[in-house]
Amino acid sequence: MCGYIRRTNDSSATSDMLIKAGLEHLAGKFNEIGEPRTEHFYPAFGGNPARQIRKLIIAGNDGPITVDATWWFDCHQAGNALEVGKRTTFNARNLDSPYWKGALQHNRAVVVATGLGESKVVDGKKRQYLMEGERPFLMGALYRAFDNGCYSCAVITRDSHPRFDAYHDKAFPLFLPDNESFVHSWLNDTNSLSSVIEDYLENPRIIVPFRVGQVRTFKDGCLSGNAELLKAD
């Protein structure tokens, strides 16, 4: 499960990563004057459509664009806004389900992040772990576009990863390689899943090293020098 995403926007490393991924025309959007230095994204629990992942990257008519999407796939159009549905859909895991198949083929998206939060019950108590990438990273997502111009989305997760189990042992976020060819295929190959994407969905991996530490809250948490290092695969 992925239930918290953090993004620091003023990092030149983010621009470098986007350039490497073939998304250089979007790099400036993540370092705009007046934008908050750090953004915190949460799923739309409580039926709040304003809980969005901002600047979600999707395919556009003239190349990739960014949109703000409610972090809850099951939404319904309500006038000029969205109404959040009751089905828990902030993560997309069972991709073989008919519910996700259309979006997986036609509506894949990319999340730009610098950290995330995971949790695990240990000895009957819930522990929360803040995970900060040693460099910015990309995550896979699915999205829906509505006639009123609104969007909703879900972060893709896969089966648990053996080296991720210490922090969350039920699912594993789908980190994407910041490779231009892969990102282009991920966003644009919508008629069918390429063999490269299918293989990656079956064999996801930890893309960047993470510093990991237990925190009381994700938003206010910061990691000390005692944070553990989770190496990349």
Image: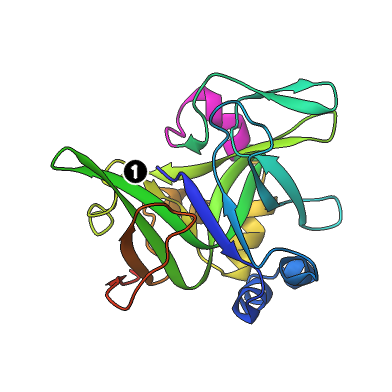
Of 54 and 201, nearer the camera is 54
Question: Where 198 sits versus 32, above or below?
Answer: above
Residue at 62% of width from left, 54% of height from top? Answer: 110
User: Residue 97 magenta-drawn?
Assistant: yes
Spot occupied by residue 21 in the image (x, y as percentages of width and height): 63, 70
Residue at 71% of width from left, 67% of height from top? Answer: 30
Spot occupied by residue 13 in the image (x, y as percentages of width and height): 60, 79
Question: Which segment did they paint magenta?
Answer: 93-104
User: Residue 86 magenta-drawn?
Assistant: no
| Residue 45 appears left or right of 226 | right
Residue at 49% of width from left, 44% of height from top? Answer: 156
Q: Under tag 1, what secondary structure?
A: loop
Spot occupied by residue 121 in the image (x, y as percentages of width and height): 23, 41
Q: Quadrant of the N terminus?
A: top left
Question: Where 135 sits versus 150, above or below?
Answer: below
Of 56 and 225, nearer the camera is 225
Considering every residue shown, the one lying at the far left of the view is 123
Q: Answer whether residue 193 is visible to the viewer in this image.
A: no
Q: Answer whether residue 82 is visible to the viewer in this image.
A: yes
Of 76 and 225, nearer the camera is 225
Q: Which residue is mark 1?
A: 171
Would you identify the image quadrant in which residue 144 lies? top right
Q: Quadrant of the C terminus?
A: bottom left
The amino acid type of the residue labelled 1 equals Ala
| Residue 223 appears left or right of 67 | left
Question: Where 203 sits versus 120, above or below?
Answer: below
Spot occupied by residue 29 in the image (x, y as percentages of width and height): 77, 66
Q: Residues within 10 Å of mark 1 (few under 14, many from 20)?
A: some
